[in-house]
Amino acid sequence: MVDKPFSKTIQWKNEKFDKKLKKVTQEKGWYYYQKSTVEGEKGVNIPLEEPIKGLWLLSCTSFTGYNEAEKMSVYSNEVLSEYDLKDLFPKNAGENVEDYNNRLKSYMVLTAKLGKETIAEGFYKDIKDTVTSKSMGGKYCQPNYFLLINPDKSTEIVRFLFSGGSIETWIPFAGNKNGLKRMAVSFTGSAERNKGGVDYEVPLFEFEEVDEKYSKKADEAAQQVANYFKFLLTNEVTETKEELVEVNEDLPWQTK
């Protein structure tokens, strides 16, 4: 068994205002979930310490969400693009093209679940309408692995789950593949948006030069993540939610 290489799963959260208490109970920002050490006690969402800067390693596709009627999370395994899969799994000697392509496609199958029940299985484009329907409550999620550079200059591999408001700004930013491969990403605050009469904020990103020593560490970290996915895919292990992160944000996101 290969241990997961990332230490935290991080998501963007908007401000929460309690009308009864008449105060903000959650500031906007990037949060990770920390389990409680007390049995039966809920964990807490902890804000990520700023400044937030990291080197991008790998991007995936998955589903996340929350079904309000069932009070259950929607989630799935993570799949890689065909381009990345070809890097991880080169064609075997004697393997014909059709068999090779079928093998790669088998690694791209998503299994979406509501609680413990499987609600859809297949390629993203084939099951997205089912999973992201209003009755189901799922939405597109793009897990991205980063080598995080902490304020004390230490590093760790983390997983950012971009969905909702964060995917709205991340996708156009990440379109600069050359920047992602050469520079660090700085998480630089937020901008106000409005959709359907609802005000919300989206995170912003910038590219930043980084010391070469971190680039070398990122190469090593990328290999750790690659080895992790090789193990998951070749051993038919379906990764599920290790950490429950609150995702039931009642915001008017459009699914991809």
Image (spheres, helix red, strand yellow):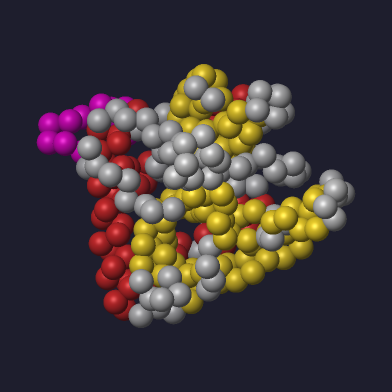
Q: Position of residue 28 (x, y in %)?
A: 68, 60
Question: Where, quadrant-wise, is the C terminus in this rendering?
Answer: top right
Residue ID at (52%, 67%): 49
The span shown in magenta is: 91-104
> In the figure, 121 relative to 184: above or below?
above
Question: In the depicted view, which residue is nearer to us: 148 or 193?
Answer: 148
> In the figure, 228 relative to 55: above or below?
above
Q: Is residue 165 visible?
A: yes
Residue ID at (62%, 42%): 247
Q: Judge from the rendering whether residue 71 lies leftward or rightward of residue 182; answer left or right.
A: right
**In magenta stretch: residue 83:** no
Residue ID at (48%, 32%): 76
Residue ID at (12%, 31%): 94
Q: Is residue 132 visible?
A: no
**In magenta stretch: residue 99:** yes
Q: Position of residue 15 (x, y in %)?
A: 72, 56
Question: Where, quadrant-wise, is the N terminus in this rendering?
Answer: top left
Q: Position of residue 79 (x, y in %)?
A: 41, 38
Q: Judge from the rendering whether residue 99 lies leftward or rightward of residue 25; answer left or right.
A: left
Q: How many marks?
A: 0
Q: Residue furthest left?
A: 93
Occupied quadrant, residue 129? top right
Q: Judge from the rendering whether residue 97 lies leftward or rightward of residue 208; answer left or right.
A: left
Q: Judge from the rendering whether residue 184 lies leftward or rightward of residue 200; answer left or right.
A: left
Occupied quadrant, residue 31? bottom right
Q: Position of residue 123 (x, y in %)?
A: 47, 29
Q: Residue furthest front?
A: 38
